[in-house]
Each structure stands twice: as structure tokens, then as C-alpha cells.
Image (spheres, grey):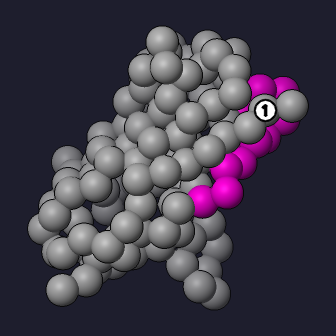
């Protein structure tokens, strides 16, 4: 079984930055890919960013140039650096990992508001 624990969410003003963390209970090299998703009330959970086992990254258009997904294999931790935050980035952010089956974290709330 895999556990993913997110942290780093909070309240930030527009234009500000946050860094989300996702601590995994096993080596990140065990996963085929890892992603960050976000979800707002009444909407589907949407992928925000992905990093593959080989290190390739991909982003949804709305966050390109503002968000960066990266990992620290020594700490078994995935990150999402979020800069130039906008009110429409407000959501619950979830960490996701795939290893034969999907694993989800519990989510962390990000609120962008003045």
C-alpha cells in the first residue's frame, strides 16, 4: 500500500507563491508517473501537472510558465511550485501516483484571494 501526504496549502494573495509537497511512503522511482490534480466544488478533478519516471514534465495550458513540478528522490517527495497565483487557481490540490494502480493523497486547500 502507498501513502501520499500533501502539505503546503493555505491562503495567499493574487500574485503570490506557494509550494505544495507530497510525501510518499515509498521510493518515487517505483512510480510510473506522478501528477498534481485540482478540484473545485461541483467540478471534476483536473490534472495540473505531471512528471514521468524519466523526468519529463507536462502542464495544463492555464498554469504553464507559472507552476513547476519537481521531485526530491532522496526525500521521497514530490513538489508543485506555484507562482503568480490567480484567484482561479483556488482549489483543493491532490497528489497522484501510479504504480500498477492509482494512489491519491488526501488533498490540500489552496485559496488565492485578497
User: Horizontal placement of 91 versus 4: left or right?
Assistant: left
Residue 101 painted magenta: yes
User: Horizontal placement of 14 versus 36: left or right?
Assistant: left
Q: Provide residue 25's location: percent of width, then percent of height.
A: 69, 27
Q: Quarter of the image containing the N terminus?
A: top right
- Tell me the quarter of the picture where residue 72 sits: top left
User: Horizontal placement of 3 versus 67: left or right?
Assistant: right
Could you tell me what secondary structure mostly forms the magenta stretch? strand
> Measuring 41% from the left and 53% from the top, which residue is drawn there?
8
Residue 64 is at least partly visible in this image: no
Q: Provide residue 45's location: percent of width, then percent of height.
A: 62, 66
Task: Count up the numbered dots.
Answer: 1
Q: Quarter of the image containing the C terminus?
A: bottom left
Q: Against 114, is 19 above or below?
A: above
Q: Against 44, is 81 above or below?
A: above
> Measuring 57% from the left and 35% from the top, which residue is drawn there?
23
User: Horizontal placement of 82 versus 20: left or right?
Assistant: left
The stretch of residues the image draws in magenta is: 98-107
Secondary element at image label 1: loop
Residue count near mark 1 (Cα–Cα under 10 Å), binned few <14, some 14–19, many ≥20: some
Q: Provide residue 103's location: percent of width, then percent of height.
A: 76, 42
| Residue at image mark 1 | 2
> Measuring 32% from the left and 73% from the top, which residue is drawn there?
11
Q: Against 13, is 7 above or below?
A: above
Q: Residue furthest left?
A: 15
Front one among 69 and 106: 106
Residue 30 painted magenta: no
Amino acid at each position: 500500500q502507498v501513502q501520499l501526504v500533501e502539505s503546503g496549502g493555505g491562503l495567499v494573495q493574487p500574485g503570490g507563491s506557494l509550494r505544495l509537497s507530497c510525501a510518499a511512503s515509498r521510493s518515487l522511482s517505483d512510480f510510473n508517473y506522478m501528477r498534481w490534480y485540482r478540484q473545485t466544488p461541483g467540478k471534476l478533478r483536473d490534472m495540473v501537472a505531471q512528471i514521468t519516471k524519466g523526468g519529463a514534465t507536462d502542464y495544463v495550458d492555464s498554469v504553464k510558465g507559472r507552476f513547476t513540478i519537481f521531485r526530491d528522490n532522496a526525500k521521497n517527495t514530490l513538489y508543485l511550485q506555484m507562482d503568480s497565483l490567480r484567484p482561479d487557481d483556488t482549489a483543493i490540490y491532490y497528489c497522484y501516483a501510479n504504480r500498477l494502480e492509482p494512489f491519491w493523497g488526501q488533498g490540500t486547500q489552496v485559496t488565492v484571494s485578497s
